Structures are given as C-alpha cells and as structure tokens.
C-alpha cells in the first residue's frame, strides 16, 4: 500500500459529529510510552495483583467449568447471573448496604456502567455535575453523550458543598441530570469525602431533585484512618458502582451497579445493545473467588504494599520537590494529586519528563474544561518504593529545569513579569 494512503482517512466524511466531542484517554495514550525500557509509569491506575494466590485462582478457574459445565460458556441474562448478584449483595453488606439481587446489575467493568449512565441520562446539552478534578474515564464516557459539564471543585474533604449548593441554585430544581462523585480516595485527587459532606450531599440531592452517582472502586483500599459510611447505606436512591478491578483483578471486567429497580430495566436495554451479556465464565470465576478464597487476607497484604508505596512517594516529594509544590495525603486508594505554581504547564512538561523516563497524567485530563494545567495525577499502587523514589526525583529535576528556564527568560527580558512571583 502506498504510504500516502495510510494518512488518508477514506471515512472522514462519514463519521458522526458525536466523535468530535469524544475525549482521548491520556492513560491509554501513555501506555506505549511507559512500556519503553527504563520508563517508570506513574500515569496508569493498575492494581498490584502479585499477591493473588495463583494455585487458588487456578482452582477457581477449574471449578467454574467443573461446577457449572457448559452453562459457564453460554450466553447469559443481560442483568447478570443471580449467583453473581447474590455474591455482590454479600460483598456490599460489609458497607451496610442491604439489597436483594434484583437491585444489582452486573456490567463488564465500571467503565461500562459509566457509559450506560451517560446513555440512560444524558441528552446533548444536558447539565451534569462532576467533581473538579474528576476521573478521566468518566469524563470520557459521559462526553460521548455531549453533556454540559458543571465542575464543582473539591478540597481535602471532598466535593465542596457550598459550591455545589450554589451550582444547583444557579441551574434550578431538577435541571442537572446527576451528580457524579468518587467519595473514597478519589481518582485523581486521593481525597475522601467527610461524613458531614456526604450527608449534606444527600440533602441537597433531594432538595434540588438531582440523583447521586457514587462510584466506589477504592473503598476497600484504606490503609489509615477510619472508614466513612457509603452514601448508598444512608439513602436508597443513590446509584452505587463497585468493581472487582481494584480488589481482585481488572482483566476480569466484572463490576456492578446497585440501583433502584426501574433503572435496572433501562440498563438491561443498554446491555442488550452493547454486548448482549457479561461473560458468564468470568462471573462464575468471581463467585468462586469470593466464596472459596480467603480474599480478605490477600487484600490485606496488598493494602500494606500500597501504604508503603504511598509513604515512599510522600517521602520523596518532601525530599526532592520545590517548596512551592503542594500535594494531597491519601488515606487509601491509588493516587495523589500534585499542584505546582500556576505558571507551570504540566502538559508541556510531559515531554521532558518522558525523556527522563517518567510518566504522569497532566491535570487538564481530569477536567472537562481546560482547568488543571499546573497540576498532575501520580499513581503509587503499581511501582516499587525504589522506583517511586527514583521517578519523583526525575520529576523534580524536570520541574527545576523549567524553573531555571523561567529565570533565564526573565533575566533576558523575554518575560515582562516574573512568573515565579506570580
Ligand atoms: C473512579 C473509577 N471509576 C471506574 C473505573 C473503571 O473501573 P473498571 O476497571 O471496573 O472498569 C476506574 C478505574 O480506574 C476508576 O478509577
């Protein structure tokens, strides 16, 4: 094929306009970069699954076939196996969420659940409320349905309720389609919403007639402090999302939504059009894993590793980063959020960082509106403490280099104002 044909897209005129509003995933884009030798990846959100007991995992895989026979390899119902839904009921009872299997809907990952939420609720132009910053995969999933994103900033205690209330009042009762929040060890900020704010969020949701979506992939990954109750345990109208991705393994693509029953019928329609059903085999495997394996002890070991890695990252930040930088102190989860002085552009700096062998997610990816330019998301769940220290050292060098550049431009008169004092 002549090379010019490679660049020419013969379908250019045929694509739907909706593609224009689709966001790229920085994490997926950086996948190739971080697989280069010598690059330390702080950009992804991968769990460390090395503590999984492989013999027992293999036994679950075998039992899935021996116990269920060919049923495990057949098409299944669109709302998921009743046994898997019962397993979910057992799992979430740990969080004082008491539901029946018919309030549970199984999806191929929470990412699919987010897509279905967009499909079910968003008409083009509809207002939806997200935290600032928010999970880039949710922004990507929702953006396909062309909403108007309303961003409510968070702080160390989660989404700011004063700003949320002002936003709801500005929009009017029932106008926003939903409020999307990740209350535990938020992705990307690492912060946890306080109990007081959770209660206030529920009050506001009823007062202004806007449903709450509580996305909770990290809730079991607390390594210090006291757990805070889920909003779904306080209020049945909350749509709650959980997944096996961070507590078992993401390759299984098994997750769940707990929702009021009428929504389940709508989700069924979505799944019928988007995959027919979720892999029965993977569901049976998960049922066995959560019934037969001492998975809590496995997870405990992993959580200890996450704490060591978080500690290694914070120690390295304190040692190497300039005093102008600020970062969050997550009590669990995978990420922390770093804010550099406002004149920094972390998108521009990414090329330098990649050259020096470290990848992160520039903050703009975690906002729908260009905010977050001087911030970055870094992951501590996957790399060893030694690699984390080395990566933060390299990042600090890249930051110092930028600061030097600003100083040089200033003294050469290229910059009129001193950004270092701005
Ligand atoms: C907040 C949040 N929601 C959903 C997901 C997607 O999870 P899953 O692997 O179940 O699709 C992630 C993955 O990183 C996440 O951080």
Image (cartoon, rainbow, N blue to C red):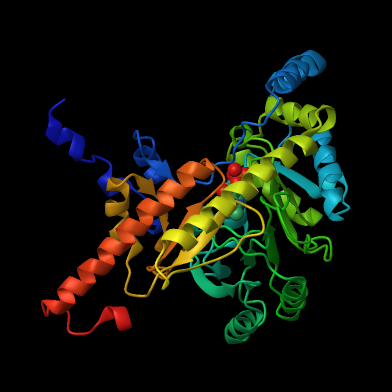
The quadrant in which residue 119 appears is: bottom right
Instruction: Tell me residue 309's x, y (percent).
Output: 57, 48
| Viewer can see residue 110 | no
The quarter of the rendered structure image containing the N terminus is: top left
Counting from the top left corner in percent of width and height, residue 324 is at 41, 73
Residue depicted at 58% across the width and 86% down the height: 170
Q: Work out whether residue 395 can be spotted.
A: yes
Tally the marks. Answer: 0
- Given residues 369 and 125, the one toward you in this image is 369
Q: Is residue 306 left or right of residue 284?
A: left
Q: Give the residue furthest to the front.
A: 319
Task: Pick the residue in front: 74 or 390.
Answer: 390
Query: Where, quadrant-wise, is the C terminus in this rendering?
Result: bottom left
Across and down, in percent, residue 320 comes to 41, 60
Q: Residue at x 66, y 55 (%)?
A: 332
Q: Quadrant of residue 305?
A: top right
Please state the horizontal and vertical placement of residue 268, each as a whole percent of the image: 69, 44
Looking at the image, which is closer to me, 185 or 65?
185
- In this rendering, the answer to whether 120 lies above or below 208 is above
Above or below: residue 388 compared with residue 377: above
Work out whether residue 360 or residue 250 is closer to the camera in this orientation and state it: 360
Q: Is residue 294 left or right of residue 189?
A: right
Q: Residue at x 80, y 42 (%)?
A: 88
Left/right of residue 374 with respect to residue 262 in the rendered view: left
């Amino acid at each position: 094929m002549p090379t010019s044909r490679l660049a020419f897209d013969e379908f250019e005129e045929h694509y739907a306009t909706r593609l224009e509003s689709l966001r790229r995933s920085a994490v997926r884009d950086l996948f190739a970069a971080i697989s280069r030798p010598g690059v330390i990846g702080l950009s992804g959100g991968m769990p460390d699954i090395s503590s999984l007991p492989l013999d027992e995992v293999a036994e679950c895989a075998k039992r899935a076939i021996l116990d269920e026979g060919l049923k495990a390899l057949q098409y299944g119902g669109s709302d998921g196996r009743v046994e898997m839904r019962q397993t979910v009921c057992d799992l979430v009872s740990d969080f004082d969420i008491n539901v029946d299997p018919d309030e549970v809907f199984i999806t191929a990952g929470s990412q699919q659940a987010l897509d279905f939420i967009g499909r079910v609720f968003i008409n083009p132009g509809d207002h939806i409320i997200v935290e600032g910053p928010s999970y880039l995969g949710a922004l990507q999933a929702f953006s396909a349905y062309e909403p108007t994103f309303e961003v409510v900033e968070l702080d160390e205690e989660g989404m700011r309720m004063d700003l949320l209330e002002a936003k709801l009042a500005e929009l009017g009762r029932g106008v926003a389609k939903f409020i999307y929040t990740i209350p535990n060890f938020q992705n990307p900020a690492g912060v946890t919403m306080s109990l007081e704010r959770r209660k206030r969020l529920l009050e506001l949701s009823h007062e202004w007639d806007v449903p709450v979506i509580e996305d909770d992939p990290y809730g079991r990954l607390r390594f210090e402090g006291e757990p805070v109750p889920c909003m779904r345990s306080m209020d049945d109208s909350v749509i709650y999302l959980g997944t096996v991705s961070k507590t078992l393994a993401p390759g299984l693509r098994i997750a769940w939504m707990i929702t009021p029953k009428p929504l389940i019928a709508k989700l069924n329609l979505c799944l019928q059009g988007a995959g027919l059903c979720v892999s029965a085999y993977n569901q049976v495997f998960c049922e066995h894993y959560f019934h037969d394996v001492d998975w809590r002890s496995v997870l405990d070991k992993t959580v200890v590793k996450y704490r060591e890695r978080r500690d290694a990252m914070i120690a390295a930040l304190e040692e190497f980063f300039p005093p102008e930088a600020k970062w969050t102190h997550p009590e669990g989860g995978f990420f922390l959020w770093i804010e550099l002085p406002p004149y920094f552009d972390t998108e521009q700096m990414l090329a330098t960082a990649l050259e020096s062998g470290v990848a992160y997610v520039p903050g703009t990816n975690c906002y729908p509106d260009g905010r977050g330019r001087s911030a970055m998301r870094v992951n501590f769940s996957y790399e060893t403490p030694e690699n984390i220290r080395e990566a933060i050292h390299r990042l600090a060098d890249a930051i110092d280099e930028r600061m030097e550049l600003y100083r040089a431009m200033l003294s050469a008169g290229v910059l009129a104002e001193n950004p270092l004092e701005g």
